[in-house]
Amino acid sequence: MSLHDALVAIVLGLVEGVTEFIPVSSSGHLIVATEALGLHADDPKMVVFNIVIQLAAILAVVWIYRAKILDLLRRLPRDPVAQRFAMAVVVATLPAAIIGLKLDDWIEANLFSTKTVAWALIVGGIGILLVERFASTRRSRVPEMEDIRLGDALKVGLAQCLALFPGVSRSGATIMGGMGFGLSRRAATEFSFFLAIPVMVGASLLKLVKERDALAVSDAPFFALGCLVAFLSALVVVRFLIRFVATNSFNGFAWYRIAVGAVLLGLIALGWMPG
């Protein structure tokens, strides 16, 4: 592995780990970062690399919540609350899974560009500001993650479909959707984390099978370094976010999205970045 490849792996692994679970769009940031490094996001090697580091990031959530996941699995055969929560995760997963299978190729072919990411960042930022303003005016009726009802889970799952558009952010769509539908800030955030496990693992494995011809043993060190950086940085971010949501709004992330989107549109207009 060359020094250039090592730097690319570290930068993109860090971008993935830092942005995957906060509402700023990891896919959007990866597209922009890849292009900024002089690479192409649709290059088969980079497609596979981004899939692999995404899997590494989701492993950070599995690790942090390993005790709760094992407890839910242990209770599942006899506990109605655990059974209802498991069903809620399934219900919330289905809309994006169904729509994603049908539209994934079209989205990759037509929407993976810096300009679409920029506009999605701006529109998503405005959406976060609106949800925060609306949610702050009423009391949450779902205080804890395991209190979520199947109807609420379906609504969150439908909101997650917005994240199929690059730049929207899966975590942003599910957290803001959950808060908009009556989940508390913490419940919406933790449910988003749990929902990420089947959604991201399933989508990543399907993409890996589709792009398997791009896998090469010689790229193993490059992939391994990216995975390590993505895993460690995601660990830090998820733990930070759990503490952050207890006393803070997501408005800061919204303004960040709007600012980054505006800067990207400016760079595209000046011809300094491909659109």
Image (cartoon, rainbow, N blue to C red):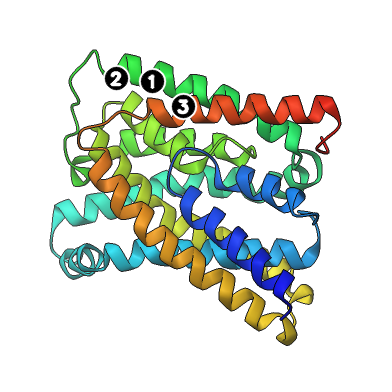
Q: Tell which tag, 1 or 3, sits nearer the viewer.
A: 3
| Amino acid type indicated by mark 3 | Ala
- Residue plotted at (36% across, 30% down): 250
In the picture as drawn, the residue positioned furthest to the left comes out as 79
Q: x, y (%) of residue 163?
A: 56, 39
Q: x, y (%) of residue 18?
A: 47, 52
- Dot 2, crowdedness within 10 Å: few (<14), some or many (≥20)? some
**SS class, disc 1:** helix
In this rendering, is residue 137 above or below 241? Answer: above
| Residue at the spot of label 3 | 254
CB-based contact (under 8 Å), mark 1 and mark 2: yes
CB-based contact (under 8 Å), mark 3 and mark 2: no
Tag of residue 28:
none
Marks 1/3: CA–CA distance: 11 Å
| Amino acid type indicated by mark 1 | Val
- Dot 3, crowdedness within 10 Å: few (<14), some or many (≥20)? many
| Amino acid type indicated by mark 2 | Ala
In the picture as drawn, the residue positioned furthest to the front comes out as 3
